[in-house]
Amino acid sequence: MTRIKLQTALFFLFLICVHPRSSAADYSKFSHATQKHQAACVTCHKFPTKDWTKISSFPDVTDYPSHDACVSCHRPQFFRGARPPICSVCHSKTSPRDEVRYAFRNPAAKLQFAIEFPHNKHQDAIASLRFAHPPQGYNNCTICHGPRTATFKAAPTDHGSCFNCHWKSQEPVAANCNGCHKLASAPYVRAEPVRFSAKFIHDGGGEKKQHVAECTTCHINITKSASLRWLKPDVPITACTECHNKDGLRQDLNKELIAIDKNRSFTCVYCHAANVGSLDPPASHYLIAERPPLKRKDIK
Amino acid sequence: MRLAFVTVLLVVTVVLAQQPAAQQTGVLRLRVRVKADDAAPLKGLARKRFFLIPGTLEQNRALITSIEQQPLTTRDCYYKQHHASAQLISWLQEGDCESVYCRSIGNEFVTGPKAVPEFASAFAANHTVFGNDLIALQWLTNYLSPDLRDGFYKDRQRTLQTLLNQSGMIQSVMTDQKGSAYFTDLGPGTYVISNVIPTELGQTLVTWNCEVHIKPEDLATEKPYLISNRKDKTVKCVGIEKPKPTCATD
């Protein structure tokens, strides 16, 4: 009996030794979701960081927290081996002779925070408008959304446009990180916006540049949006057909729907790239043309 | 065995039948066209917020009475009451701005003949902190007094929230440059479109409380809805105009 107990004990001891411990922490990865990492941001991040003038044109958090922020709890991990994994959270080379760090924040790392930005409040407060685009002295969407490509506008990537108003006094102020940065449920990669009408150019619209309009004329859901969550920069087909499918003006949509009637393999090219233009036109397109929706497969 | 199969099939059918079908929704395209006075041309009312409240005018009678009876401090009166300089009031009027955030503040408004005293003081205060002209100018609003910076906006928001707490407001949108805005994802029913806080238009205040019906046949379409402060056969709802009150400081 004693022998069996001893064998059983040895067996469990063996299992404990050889089985990789599932709870072993990976110190090369830093997570803000770890409970002990959820103290006030200023516990680790100094604001502004010491050498902000070297990187930024305005006072900002431009670097990782100092060693003190980590060592206070992670002294054993700091001095484990010649290349402690914990160093690789910030340092591109884990060597005591090399202080080089990744850019802050590391563009290759997944995002841990979501941004809470109420477009509706900002529309109310800042976006009074006289002219849609320069020359003008009135604030509008272009304060934050400058040009990126002919097709896409840029979104803010730093605090530049925020601190103009939110440096101090106006909440959430610069020191109140949590006012805008909310811990995401899981690390994520920012999704690139999907453009269905790939041929649309914001500064286009012929010689008169008819596309240069106020952003909310087409992006109709922006002014009611209190959060970035589930916000899509969606544009209804009617925003296009106001000009592009008008009696006596142009019939760009109607022409392509008729082309599909004649040849169900026809690819819509006026607005779309082939990947979208070869799909079934959505019901909204037929509605504008005052026709019942059709599927390509049903066309003889 | 066969009985068991039939039973399972029946249960699955019943469960699937009870799944709600994807609900079709409609879009209401609001257009607001106004005349500042009888001589002025009819034009789109830009940059004004409108609210969509479920129910009929009668069902929202208490809210509408509150909207119509609310005491209102106009923009100019607010800034006068808070001792804004004549230059600041004029700067706001020039841009039809409700707050200092609506226009960019260039150097010409800090020094020189067009200078606004409040901006000059804020610039100087900011400059003593960073010693940097660009930051002092770009971050100027951070150093204005709260009453002049966003006090008017916050006052309006408090009034709005007090009024809207009486309703089940479901959406609010802002008109674009042409006076258009879209309420989307609407189910069939009756709604009230209101600006809740009267719009300052020339020498008058205009309030809209308009009943609109979204019928089943309006779903999957874009229903146009034109409102104005002048009657016309195409206008679905005419706002009520009142003269602007005089300021207590006048």
Image (spheres, grey):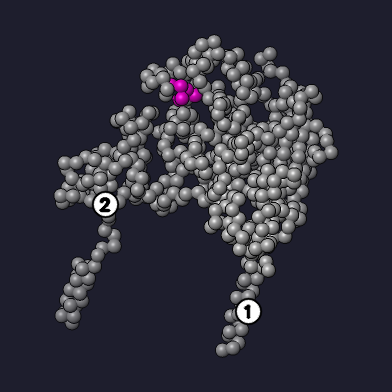
Image location of residue A164, percent across then percent down: 46, 29
Q: Is residue B238 above or below residue A246?
A: above
Q: Would residue B65 be visible to someone looking at this image?
A: no
Q: Is residue A1 above or below residue A148?
A: below
Q: Is residue A144 above or below residue B58?
A: above
Say which amino acid is labelled 1.
Leu
Image location of residue B98, percent across then percent down: 61, 26
Q: In terms of secondary structure, where does tag 1 sit?
A: helix
Magenta stretch holds residue A28 = no
Label 1: few (<14), some (14–19) or many (≥20) C-alpha neighbours in 10 Å: few
Farthest residue in the right direction? B233
* Label 1 chain ID: B
Image quarter in which the N terminus of chain A is found = bottom left
Residue at which label 2 appears: A27
Q: Could you tell whether B144 is left or right of A84 in the image?
A: right
Image: magenta residue range:
B136-141
Magenta stretch holds residue B140 = yes
